[in-house]
Image (cartoon, coloured by chain):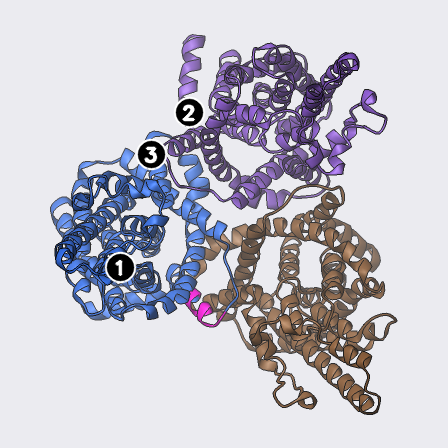
Chain colours: A brown, B purple, C blue
Amino acid sequence: MDFVSLFFIDFVKQLQSPTLAFLIGGMIIAALGSELVIPEAICSIIVFMLLTKIGLTGGIAIRNSNLAAMIFPMIFAVITGITIVFIARYTLAKLPKVKTVDAIATGGLFGAVSGSTMAAALTVLDEQNMAYEAWAGALYPFMDIPALVTAIVVANIYINKKKRKEAAYSIGHESFSEQLVTAGNYPDQKDYPSSRQEYLSQQKGDTDNRVKIWPIIEESLRGPALSAMLLGLALGLFTQPESVYKSFYDPAFRGLLSILMLVMGMEAWSRVGELRKVAQWYVVYSVIAPFVHGLIAFGLGMIAHQVAGFSMGGVVVLAVIAASSSDISGPPTLRAGIPSANPSAYIGASTAIGTPVAIGLCIPFFLGLAQALGG
Amino acid sequence: MDFVSLFFIDFVKQLQSPTLAFLIGGMIIAALGSELVIPEAICSIIVFMLLTKIGLTGGIAIRNSNLAAMIFPMIFAVITGITIVFIARYTLAKLPKVKTVDAIATGGLFGAVSGSTMAAALTVLDEQNMAYEAWAGALYPFMDIPALVTAIVVANIYINKKKRKEAAYSIGHESFSEQLVTAGNYPDQKDYPSSRQEYLSQQKGDTDNRVKIWPIIEESLRGPALSAMLLGLALGLFTQPESVYKSFYDPAFRGLLSILMLVMGMEAWSRVGELRKVAQWYVVYSVIAPFVHGLIAFGLGMIAHQVAGFSMGGVVVLAVIAASSSDISGPPTLRAGIPSANPSAYIGASTAIGTPVAIGLCIPFFLGLAQALGG
Amino acid sequence: MDFVSLFFIDFVKQLQSPTLAFLIGGMIIAALGSELVIPEAICSIIVFMLLTKIGLTGGIAIRNSNLAAMIFPMIFAVITGITIVFIARYTLAKLPKVKTVDAIATGGLFGAVSGSTMAAALTVLDEQNMAYEAWAGALYPFMDIPALVTAIVVANIYINKKKRKEAAYSIGHESFSEQLVTAGNYPDQKDYPSSRQEYLSQQKGDTDNRVKIWPIIEESLRGPALSAMLLGLALGLFTQPESVYKSFYDPAFRGLLSILMLVMGMEAWSRVGELRKVAQWYVVYSVIAPFVHGLIAFGLGMIAHQVAGFSMGGVVVLAVIAASSSDISGPPTLRAGIPSANPSAYIGASTAIGTPVAIGLCIPFFLGLAQALGG
């Protein structure tokens, strides 16, 4: 069979996999007005268990494996995370009716990683019997944190430049309305606790409004998703968690993921309305960006495949985490780091379109691509 | 051994089954004043998982089986659901101190199905190695929805008739107190959202107070219990959920059910007090009705057994869902559809007596009956 | 190898066991400021499942075993529970800046048993393949209840004596400030519901302020932890829960425990601050007491080992439940029974230091001791 038919057969087959089927099922029952609610507490514990399991898998794998093999994929994960933000900065931000800070924040969220999407990809790879490095899940923070840091830094550089221009301009033309515009760049800032204000070192006056990078990294690492994964990683590396891993975290993984996929499907449907409040270009971006980001990572992954023997399954994981957009840890970090950006824009784009596209379309797409290329 | 001894031995043996033992345990610890609380969020997710599992089982079974075999049991399920409401209308409603609308609503709730009771029956059948059709759980909506629709329609016909009589009477005798009585039929109606008001098409004036059937069906289907089951059914029919079914939903079933049985036992005990507020005939009805309803369904099931080869285990399932009364999806539908009925009457009767009788007495009774007849 | 080296090798090996590793992991991520939160509802259901499982194990074991073998360990559990309170009464209470009632309440909490710590001990014993009686978990209430009852009785005897002295003194020297001091012994008492006030039979006046013992026992038995365990015990004794035990409660045990250990680690870290508000002697007591209490129970257990063939694993269980301090059921009972004691003192000492010491140090210590002695 030729490439295209192989690809389409795989694609349709994968939509029947429980992981994707539950996502689509969630969207359908939400569309039909179901009153089914999965309690918040259940979602939290599922995310904890999925990411702890991914961390444990990674930690146990790294303990028994060659660290050198991880270097290329890690570097490529960092490059992809940073690149994604600049893509948004020079495409989405240039579109009509799109505010530049909103576009940069959206880029940051699409560069950051969704643990649930990654869990879905790992499960679909298992279902399709496609091998990948057990430590592949540990690539998560290497793309997630650089993307968030870059977005916050780029946004603040932009805001400072704009302010300096306005300040220069307003020396001669000071007016009440312009002061309002300037102030309008920080509408929510007063509401954030002082620890979050640390991102901006404001003590030396407006012109030296430099961004501190370490607090952003720290806040990312402290988020519930990443800290569960890093805890699992550390326990896998330094202790003997095999008994609890085999009796609990591993067998429960697929089932818990199916519930989370259902919730994400329902959530995606319920957020569609928010997109009406922002420029329609966000919809276009949210559909195209996951494929573009995934293809960049897929290309870089193929280099690692040729040069360093990175598995084709690992290439798919790298592509999917690039295609995914953060749903848990990203939004609060961005809100604190770029308070002037509009959360409806970036959260709506990510949850309502980016995530279902990444899970429902990009996972089958990149898996099909890898099977067609590698098979 | 003769029929009666066989029956009693089975009955006592089944009370020791974990499913029934946890129900009785829940009643006992509640009676002893235990402060044990199973959080609401846990109960919700358990109900979701049990009904998704029953749906998945049904969907996978229907995909691989002969639809024709389902026709008789389905028709009998519909007949039983409708009959139960009319039984309440012409027995319970005629008893002293029982309001007619309350009696009809109670009939609706006892005709509707409890997913937890059905789950208990399926588990006890498994424990006793009695075979039943895997799609038997899919009979649920075929009894549940007709019973609720019939109750709401019958209640509203009764209310309209009564109103017309009163209107005719009050033309000559208009008085302030009678207006109060008439208004009293709809005490809560203003509190319900407009979507629920749709049940009654009131725009044409009081005399054309017809009941719309479709919104009742829609609301039933949207309830959390039925929509979880239908989701499972659809996923079982159209996708390949076997991996997640075998690794997660199936093995967790019995254990989760044991927790839910405990909760239902505690809940039954705590609701006993509510029954003191209503006529004592509700107690009599709640004890006898599950057996009467179950026997009707058992008789119809035996016809399907003789004519169409419906299994004896399937006959037990049909009898138990007839004996059961709805605890999750039924009450809100009835509240919206018959706002003038007193929830203390129907919920108290169902939760405090109907459900424990159905699970603790009817399951062993009908199982014993089937074993004695079929063995 | 000699005793000491054997002991240290075991000790380090056990810190790598998943149970202890998750406890330490929880403390570390809390110290690093992780925003990970395990929802309250999840903690409740985990405690329920762990203690129901321990109860079921015990019940099934007692059904199949010789009751006579339990007599010695049970008596020793009661003796240990009572002794621990008197140790606190005559050591901690004598230290500078320590209030006597606070010290007695702390002794009660350290004499009472932590179900989670016991669950951790049973799991570590399994991991190390050290045999213990399956009914060992059933020793819990035999130490827990006597300790709480003794603490409340001793505290109230002390308060009454003090009051009588003050009353005698104040006849001649009545002053406003002294009345305040006397009243200060019962600062919270008005806030407790009347059912809890029953502990003190106040109707006969202040001088006959006798403590009723039965309500304290009743409240202990009704607490969520003990009633889950007793429910499991009864179900194990009188019904056939083996199917649900093997398919659900037993396999989930270790995994659920790992989550609870994580929560207890985080909780311990977050409570460290509370200790700053009370005398530093509580810190010294909380570190030393678990070892002293455990050694007393270990010694008594060794007698049962010699005399009645109690297993070495059973001796470890007895020592660990003596070393443990109550975290769920104890605090509310003590608050109601000794309202004048300061909860910051006893809860802070127990949660922040006593529990991590018992789990992280005493379990490896007593297990190492048993292996070195018995191996």
Same chain shared by disc 2 and disc 1 = no
Q: Does the magenta portion include C292? A: no
Which x, y percent locates residue A252?
Answer: 54, 50
- Counting every numbered tag in the picture gives 3
Outermost residue, top direction? Answer: B2
Looking at the rendered image, the disc whose residue lies closer to the viewer, 3 or 1, is 1
Which x, y percent locates residue A20?
Answer: 70, 51
Name which residue lies at 28% across and 48% down.
C337
Amino acid at circle 2:
Leu
Mark 3 crowd level (few <14, some 14–19, many ≥20, 10 Å Cα): some
Mark 3: which secondary structure? helix
Name which residue lies at 56% across and 55% down.
A44
How far, Cα to Cα, is label 3 from label 1? 49 Å
Name which residue lies at 53% across and 43% down.
B40
How far, Cα to Cα, is label 2 from label 3? 14 Å
Q: Mark 1 points at which residue?
A: C180
How far, Cα to Cα, is label 2 from label 1? 59 Å
Residue C234 - label: 3
Location of residue C145 with respect to B203 vertically, above or below: below
Specify the principal SS of the magenta part. Answer: helix
Chain that bears disc 2: B
Mark 1 crowd level (few <14, some 14–19, many ≥20, 10 Å Cα): few
Residue C24 seen anywhere in this rendered image of the structure: no
Same chain shared by disc 3 and disc 1 = yes
Compare marks 3 and 1 and give the one earlier in the sequence.
1
Residue B15 - label: 2
Looking at the rendered image, the disc whose residue lies closer to the viewer, 2 or 1, is 1
Residue A295 falls in which quadrant of the image? bottom right
Give the magenta-colored segment's residue range.
Answer: C26-33
> In the rendered image, which quarter contains the N terminus of chain B?
top left
